[in-house]
Image (spheres, rainbow, N blue to C red):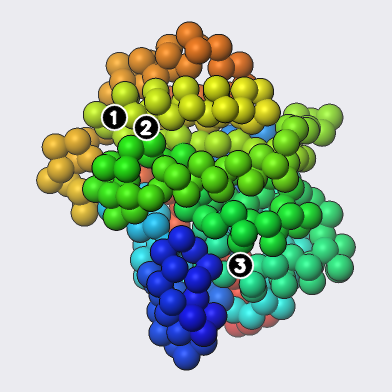
Amino acid sequence: MSGCMLCPRACGADRESGRRGRCGADQELQVARAALHMWEEPCISGAEGSGAVFFSGCPLGCIYCQNRKISRGESGMVISTGRLAEIFLELQQQKANNINLVTAGHFLPQVIEALSLAKGQGLKIPVVYNSSAYEKPEALRRLDGLVDIYLPDFKYISSELAAAYSNAPDYPQVAAAAIREMVRQRPEPQFDTRGIMTSGVIVRHLLLPGHVREAKQIIRYLHEEYGNRIYISMMNQYTPMEDVAGDLLLGRRVTKREYERLLAFAEQLGVEQGFYQEGETAKESFIPEFGCQGVLKEEDKK
């Protein structure tokens, strides 16, 4: 990490010397939450929950980020790779259906080391890599054999929108290449007898208010490119945050009509393997608290 090139930003920050990269992180591993998470897709959370580990910082930095407290490094605790491996095993003991690595790419070397340690000590449940898809394929190849399920976003297909909302005009090309590598590694969805996914790729798209056309283009691309090799998760849970309160589009929620138009389009396309959301999902209550739950050992809390 002396000249960090892990993510597509390729900022070259000397993270070893304590400088922070575009992701907001230096070389110290920082985790904001490690707990059972019930709000993922049904085949990820199930009844028992997904063992979600939220990492602090983010290379993408969307202006409407729903998890802004951690993506900006405002929440989290520095831990060792050994402690991270222990967390994985503790979540397994809590009957988690999987280990869910949420925005972990900027800590890739530490995560690989921790996964290898945990697997050597009895970690057997599937590992989920939960990502913005703003990843280098060569970085993802280092996870081949360690990750069982990829859970990327596909946020934008328009370079202009990617530039406006994430300052990343290259996002569409980067994400497409990243997802291609993920599908290469896990080309066939597999499930256990309970319907919990054990291997495969689920691509998410968070519908943004006023951007149904963009969403349709993304769903069309994914369906035409991959068909039933992946699952597509269409989400309506966008929650306006204070940073975009004054924006004419991002300052409001997605309407019922907007979401219905997207779902109808997916049905017309012939999307068979997908997920959609019901009920009042656009609430801040669906955003977990990032108070470092599960990060410290019980004995260290005293």
In the image, 224 versus 17, the foreground residue is 224
In the image, 202 versus 275, the foreground residue is 202
Packing grade of label 3 (10 A; few <14, some 14-19, many >=20) is some
Packing grade of label 1 (10 A; few <14, some 14-19, many >=20) is some
- Dot 1 amino acid type: His
Q: Position of residue 269 (x, y in %)?
A: 50, 12
Residue corresponding to mark 2 = 207
Residue at 46%, 60% in the rendered image: 8
Image side of residue 164 versus residue 265, left or right: left
- Dot 2 amino acid type: Leu
Q: Is residue 147 above or below residue 267?
A: below
Residue corresponding to mark 3 = 108
Q: Cβ–Cβ below 8 Å for labels 2 and 1?
A: yes
Packing grade of label 2 (10 A; few <14, some 14-19, many >=20) is many
Residue corresponding to mark 1 = 211
Residue at 24%, 29% in the rendered image: 210
Quarter that holds the C terminus:
bottom right
* Distance (Cα) linking label 2 and label 3: 28 Å
Residue at 63%, 46% in the rendered image: 181
Residue at 61%, 61% in the rendered image: 139
Q: Position of residue 35 (x, y in %)?
A: 61, 57
Report the mark closest to the observer, 2 or 1.
1
- Dot 3 amino acid type: Leu
In the image, 199 versus 98, the foreground residue is 199
Q: Earlier in the sequence, mark 2 or mark 3?
A: 3
Image side of residue 116 versus residue 130, left or right: right
